[in-house]
Amino acid sequence: MTETSPQMATSLVVMGPAGVGKTTTAASLAGMLGWPYAEADEFHPAANITKMESGTPLDDKDRAPWLAAIRDWISDEAAAGRSTVVTCSALKRSYRDLLRGAQARVRFVCLTATPDLVGRRMATRQGHFMPVSLLKSQFDTFQPLEADEDGIVVSVDLPPDEVVATALRALRLSPVPRAG
């Protein structure tokens, strides 16, 4: 299901607090749909990463240029006629409003889990700059999707392939046929 015009381009923003499985889910969705994929962490300025590595939560001022860069990437891809999948915590309604300013249909895939489950996952993951100590601030900041937001909510207490299948069904999207 490849899009051919900016008017038709869609961006799936796989969102939620750190550790809910955004990267795993987004990469799988992108692969199944044949859409370009971006990891939101790659859009952070170095100062943001340094701040998080030191255990200091980002504030709205820190997040503004990061969110604008993601929004602009979505718009650039849409202008080229490509639908996309991107990870982004998008914890607050105001952050999602900024992302919705992209020149594409922005749809949210909100991944949910208990803080205990996420804490256990984060304690075992390696190579990520977000420390477990910031998990509470993530959940404290999180504002659930509202009824007027274009998105779905998927619990991640399922195996990853079932999370993706549930999201595709709820979004009414079909994977591209595999060459075989």
Image (spheres, grey):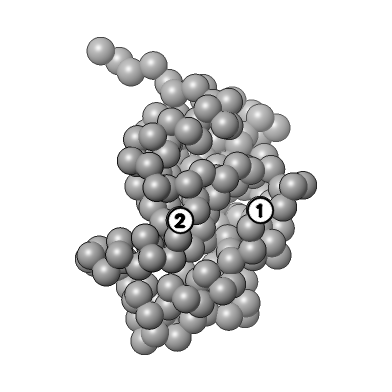
Q: Is residue 157 above or below residue 136?
A: above
Q: Element at badge 1?
A: loop
Which label sits in the foreground, 1 or 2?
2
N-terminal of the pair, mark 1 or mark 2, is: 2
Residue 107 point in image, percent of width and height: 62, 43
100 and 125: which is toward the camera:
125
10 Å neighbourhood of mark 1: few (<14), some, or many (≥20)? Answer: some
Describe residue 66's horizontal placement relative to residue 135 as left or right.
Answer: right
What residue appears at the point 52 percent right and 69 percent down from the top-left corner? 139
Horizontal and vertical percent position of residue 78: 60, 39
Q: Amino acid at mark 2?
A: Ala
Residue pictured at 35% horizontal, 67% vertical: 119
Q: Is residue 122 above or below residue 1?
A: below
Residue 130, label in figure: none
Q: Is residue 91 left or right of residue 27?
A: right
Residue 33 is left or right of residue 99, and the answer is left
Pick the front one: 50 or 156: 156
Residue 93 in which image quadrant: bottom right
In the rendered image, the vertical position of residue 37 relative to residue 56, given as above or below: above
Q: Residues within 10 Å of mark 2 (few under 14, many from 20)?
A: some
Q: Confirm whether residue 71 shows in the render.
A: yes
**Disc 1 versus disc 2: distance between alpha carbons?**
14 Å
Q: How many marks?
A: 2
On the image, numbered disc 1 is attached to which residue? 145
Three-letter code, disc 1: Leu
Q: Residue furthest right?
A: 148
Q: At 60% across and 42% down in the image, what residue appears?
A: 152
Tell me the residue that label 2 is attached to: 113
Residues 48 and 82: in front is 48
On the question of residue 46 being in view, the answer is: no
Measuring from the top left, give residue 123's x and y in whole percent.
27, 69
Q: Check the picture and name the quadrant holding the C terminus.
A: top left
